[in-house]
Image (tube, rainbow, N blue to C red):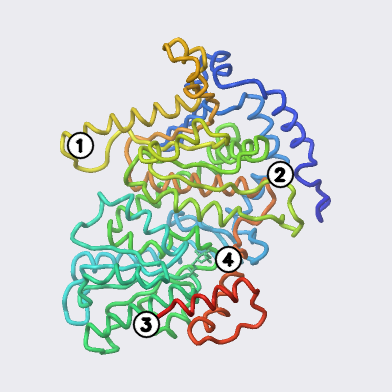
Amino acid sequence: MNADGRSRLNQTPEWTALAKHREELADTGLRDLFAGDPGRGSGYTLQVGDLYIDYSKHLVTDETLRLLRELAVATDVFGLRDAMFRGEKINTTEGRAVLHTALRAPRDAVVEVDGENVVPGVHAVLDRMAAFADRIRSGEWTGHTGRRIRNVVNVGIGGSDLGPAMAYEVLRAFTDRALTVRFVSNVDGADLHEAVHDLDPAETLFIVASKTFTTIETITNATSARDWLLSGLGGEEKAVAKHFVALSTNAGKVSEFGIDTANMFEFWDWVGGRYSFDSAIGLSLMIAVGPDRFREMLDGFHLVDEHFRTAPAEANAPLLLGLLGIWYGNFHDAQSHAVLPYSHYLSKFTAYLQQLDMESNGKSVDRDGNPVDWQTGPVVWGTPGTNGQHAYYQLIHQGTKLIPADFIGFAEPVGELSDELEAQHDLLMANFFAQTQALAFGKTPEEVRAEGVPEELVAHKTFRGNHPTTTILARELTPSVLGQLIALYEHKVFVQGAVWNIDSFDQWGVELGKVLAKRIEPALTEGAEVPGLDPSTTALVATYRTLRK
Ligand code: F6P
């Protein structure tokens, strides 16, 4: 029983009904499901904005989906959703509202936090960002020596890096190719070195992106970047004002660092780091693609926000995808979830989703602090599909693990390709469709034998099938479609956290390592003794010091 008197999740009748239903379906495979319902291929689909979502290749029936929706009702997923959209402080462990949806709300929307409408502030920052982006793109904003800015380096980590770095790759075809845009996140000095070694400081703008402006990796890299800039520009401190801007919620720390707050683009504590990319954190992307494209992307986000907020449960895509994940994670013992885009431009998309999903739902206590005795967030992984086919797909097809997967593909290639390269797109997509077919339906021993395969190889060449996949297909990978995709996953993660009764919006798990790193650093640099260090780490530190020149 929880503090609020509700039963624990896995003791509810809805959960028990799903467990029983799972047993009843144990011998039903995808071949059976398709044979029993000729309309399944087109019936188990949803259209949300530009996204055609096919969920027919899942190990579910109408009854499974009904029972899953009942679980969502019992756990009040839509109640929590409405509380989120209303600006209630649903991030209870940090006492914060969760309002990334306000970042893409239209100008005339009203979203209140503590009685104040936050939408005008959102648009004021977007307008300032747009004006700044235009000045950089037009060459009107010049560096300290009067040269135009040709290089933009975003310095940030986690949510202050992954979003813009991913989206810059996704929208490369829409970027101003005359600008060099790079992203530095790792405190490994090699990252900054590689990002700036061939750049001219007189033409380089650093965007220091940090919600808190206390993150050690970012502040360290930003300090080194400032040193690099000043040494390249004759050491004049006032150069910083023309070459550094900040994206943050913390004006005090920004000015302490030496960046004029006139050059700061703010956001707010109701924007979680991993949900911040469509806030000021997107400035590097906006400079690269221009304000109009950025706004198209925000409209795409908003479209799916509205869908999530208003669509009925049976047709609500984030709800459906969230519940399917619960079906596999909690009732089929799946431990991971693969996201496999068939687009070169989405090469960083899964890495972005890793933080979104794993930092949000990697929790093992419920909202009241009780240990959960049900599985929560999966390991999210994947890379662009055709490369994966020649690496790890073997395990998905014939290994011992059940790995549900999302396949994301497009009818049109992006940008201006030569005729030859354009024609390659059909081959790419033939692979896309072939894989979900093979995963779902496999190849029986009888089918293998019918091909004349010798008996001793039949087992090796058999594919058991029944590997569930969602297919997401859109016409083209545009800024709006990118926004739609991200919002779809944001809300999917929300649904799962709501059902599991965990706080998807804190990240206390990141803290311990940060604290310990600060304690250990003096031992590495000065040989200082670290009180309470365990014997294994003590020996490792000693060995490191011996090996270090
Ligand atoms: O990894 C922990 C974390 O707090 C993330 O949630 C966040 O995106 C990242 O660090 C960076 O934080 P900041 O933007 O405050 O530098």
Residue drawn at x 39%, y 51% as measured from the top left = 348
Using the image, determine if residue 231 lies above or below residue 308.
below
Asked whether the residues under the numbered discs 4 and 1 touch, taking CB atoms below 8 Å apart as contact, a structural biologist would say no
Q: Position of residue 93 (x, y in %)?
A: 67, 64
Give the image quarter of residue 89: bottom right
Under circle 4, the secondary element is: helix
Q: CA distance from mark 3 to mark 1?
A: 47 Å
Q: Position of residue 300 (x, y in %)?
A: 41, 46
Under circle 3, the secondary element is: loop
Please name the amino acid that badge 1 sits on. Leu
* Lateral position of residue 260 relative to residue 506, left or right: left
Pointer 1 residue:
421
- First in sequence: mark 2 vs mark 4: 2
Indicate which label's residue lies in the foreground, 3 or 1.
1
Q: CA distance from mark 4 to mark 1?
A: 43 Å
Asked whether the residues under the numbered discs 3 and 1 touch, taking CB atoms below 8 Å apart as contact, a structural biologist would say no
Dot 3: within a 10 Å radius of its alpha carbon, few (fewer than 14), some, or many (20 or more) residues?
some
- First in sequence: mark 4 vs mark 3: 3
- First in sequence: mark 3 vs mark 1: 3
The disc at residue 260 is 3
Please name the amino acid that badge 3 sits on. Asp
Please name the amino acid that badge 2 sits on. Thr
- First in sequence: mark 4 vs mark 1: 1
Pointer 4 residue:
510
- Residue 132 appears in view: no
Dot 1: within a 10 Å radius of its alpha carbon, few (fewer than 14), some, or many (20 or more) residues?
few
Pointer 2 residue:
75
| 280 vs 493, nearest the viewer | 493
Indicate which label's residue lies in the foreground, 4 or 3.
4
